[in-house]
Image: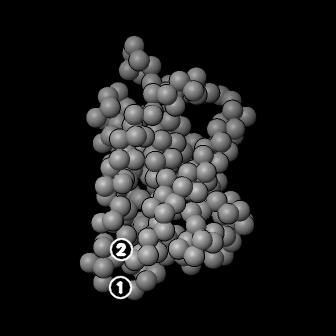
Amino acid sequence: MALQATTGVITSPFRGSRVRDAVLVVAGALFIALSAQVAIPLPFTPVPLTGQTLAVLLTGAALGSSLGLATTGLYLALALIGFPVLAATSTGSHLTGAAVLSSPTLGYVLGFMLSAVVVGALANRGLSRTPMGMALAMIAGNLAIYALGLLWLHHAISVSWSQTVALGLTPFLIGDAIKIIIAAGLLPSAWRFLR
């Protein structure tokens, strides 16, 4: 979705073109996959620092909720069928196939899908009209990632909730704040590119 600077109305630069939508979904999934390769494993948690969050937030805001969901769904599907698109684990390997479903980080990947829907929907409802509004939409999207990520992490590693937060939330707050600022700043350029 793109923002018309003069009217503040969000329009799709590719409305009515299934081929263009498909290209955008594939390109978005590849963008998220590439951003996942920017990963720093942390020795004290199974959750690595990655560039994925930035890519998911930017994709959801730029493409809208429907295409954002399709993009993040394709990203997960690529991992499930065997492509090494997820961030590397602490051992340096990439989870693929059925191993993805038992990973302690699966919730974060599922959270990407919810995040893209949330950010895209909020952008469509006018929060993309100002940088602060877009930042708020991306914070909401990030909270969606944390919600599903922490729920699954707590289930997968069977620790207390305070330990779950210490492993899956606290170490990432500053980095995610920086990613939100960068993604919100890059959004106008993404819209120009889509046009």
Residue plotted at (38% across, 57% down): 144
- The dot on residue 159 is 1
Amino acid carrying label 2: it is: Leu
Report x, y in % for residue 93: 63, 72
Q: Residues within 10 Å of mark 2 (few under 14, many from 20)?
A: many
Is residue 152 toward the left or the right of residue 159 in the image? right
Q: Quadrant of residue 167?
A: bottom left
Q: Is residue 87 above or below residue 158?
A: above
Q: Is residue 120 visible?
A: no
Residue plotted at (41% across, 18% down): 5
- The colour style of the image is one colour
Amino acid carrying label 1: it is: Val
- The dot on residue 72 is none
User: Between 6 and 157, which is closer to the camera in this rendering?
Assistant: 157
Q: Is residue 163 above or below residue 87?
A: below
User: Between 47 and 27, which is closer to the camera in this rendering?
Assistant: 47
Is label 2 in contact with label 1 (beta carbons under 8 Å)? yes
Q: Quadrant of residue 25?
A: top right
Q: Secondary structure at mark 2?
A: helix
- The dot on residue 167 is 2
